[in-house]
Amino acid sequence: MWRPSGGRNRRATCVASNPLVSAVTPLSKFSLAAMSEHIANRLAHRKDDPVPTALTVGGIFLSVVGAVGGALVDWDGFVANLLNSVVLIGPALVISNVVVVFTNRTRSENRAQQHVGMLVILVGRAIDTANDLHRLLGVDRRIEVPEVFVGGRPDVHGYLAAVRLSKVAINLSIENPDESRRLPELRLAEESYSIPNYAAVRSFADLLAREVDCLNVTVSAVGAEYFSAVASVDLVTTPSIPSKYDDAGAQSGIMQPLTGLAEISTWFDRATSGRLTNLSVESLSYFRFVDQCLYRAEKILEALTKDMPARLLAPPTADSNLVSG
């Protein structure tokens, strides 16, 4: 009997071209073992989930067992209980969302208040810097530094008023010829001096930015960080400095510029400790330095009053409003 050539190939072609067979064939690849392996691999890569993978798998397994058991034992009762549970999903989500949002916001605001308090402490040292200048001038004029927290909230307005009062006092000292008679040099005595740490302001401003939107504070902190690197005071040394301190970097009898808050603070500490004697600062450069310290503090405090919600700050007093106006 004659047979067409390629019969087997033709049958294979017909089977392969059958759409029903083509649809069933890929499904055979998804066996139970393959699906289990696929799910296990997906779960293994979810190590960052807040709930452990084993607990998630166990919960799914118990849900399947409960659903099958409930349907087999009492179908009507199972459906009724399921519908009751579905009814509670909406209120439960609303209540839990309100509670979670309130809790997270409260914690975030508490952290923000602590960061603001640290910023107030750091920039508030500019008030002490102005008081140091009055002490060097021999002027009995001191600006009192306010309390950091009033009623559990940072007193930004009080510090802002004190900084502005310090600026007014500095201008009075410059314009008064009796107070500026010690120009052109101010002798550093063996007393402590306060230098604001504006380099650390940027770090706390970044921490505050994680809790609240504070673009103005961030911009002001960047300016303060730049000032901490370029701030300058002219140090005046005299020939009476003992020679054994020459290796400390001072050059006798000349004006030596100090650049950066770190270097300025180091030399002032040497004068305080008595390691170097007969040290003076050129008065005009020191006036500018103190004025810039107060200016940076004022800008940061103003930014805090703009960016921070009013409920997180201590309310302004009558005195602070008077100075602000």
Image: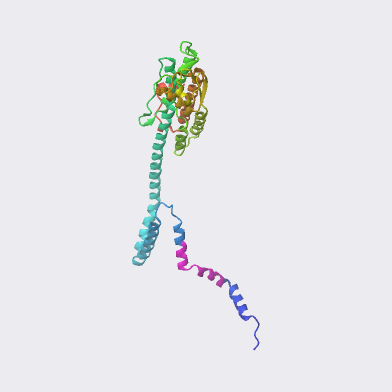
Q: Measured from the top left, where is residue 168 in percent x and y?
A: 46, 18
Location of residue 210 by image quarter: top left
Q: Verify whether residue 22 appears in magenta.
A: yes
Q: Answer with left or right where residue 4 lies relative to residue 77.
A: right
At a point 38% along the width and 57% down the height, the residue shown is 55
Look at the picture and state if 75 lies above or below 13. Answer: above
Look at the picture and state if 60 lies above or below 175. Answer: below
Prevalent SS, magenta region: helix
Q: Measured from the top left, where is residue 262 in percent x and y?
A: 47, 29
Range covered by the magenta-colored residues? 20-38
Q: Measured from the top left, where is residue 254 in percent x and y?
A: 52, 19
Q: Verify whether residue 72 appears in magenta.
A: no
Location of residue 73 by image quarter: bottom left
Return the residue found at the far top. 178
Q: Measured from the top left, where is residue 114 in percent x and y?
A: 39, 34
Visible residue check, residue 33: yes
Return the residue found at the far front. 244
Q: Nearer the viewer, residue 256 or 77?
A: 256
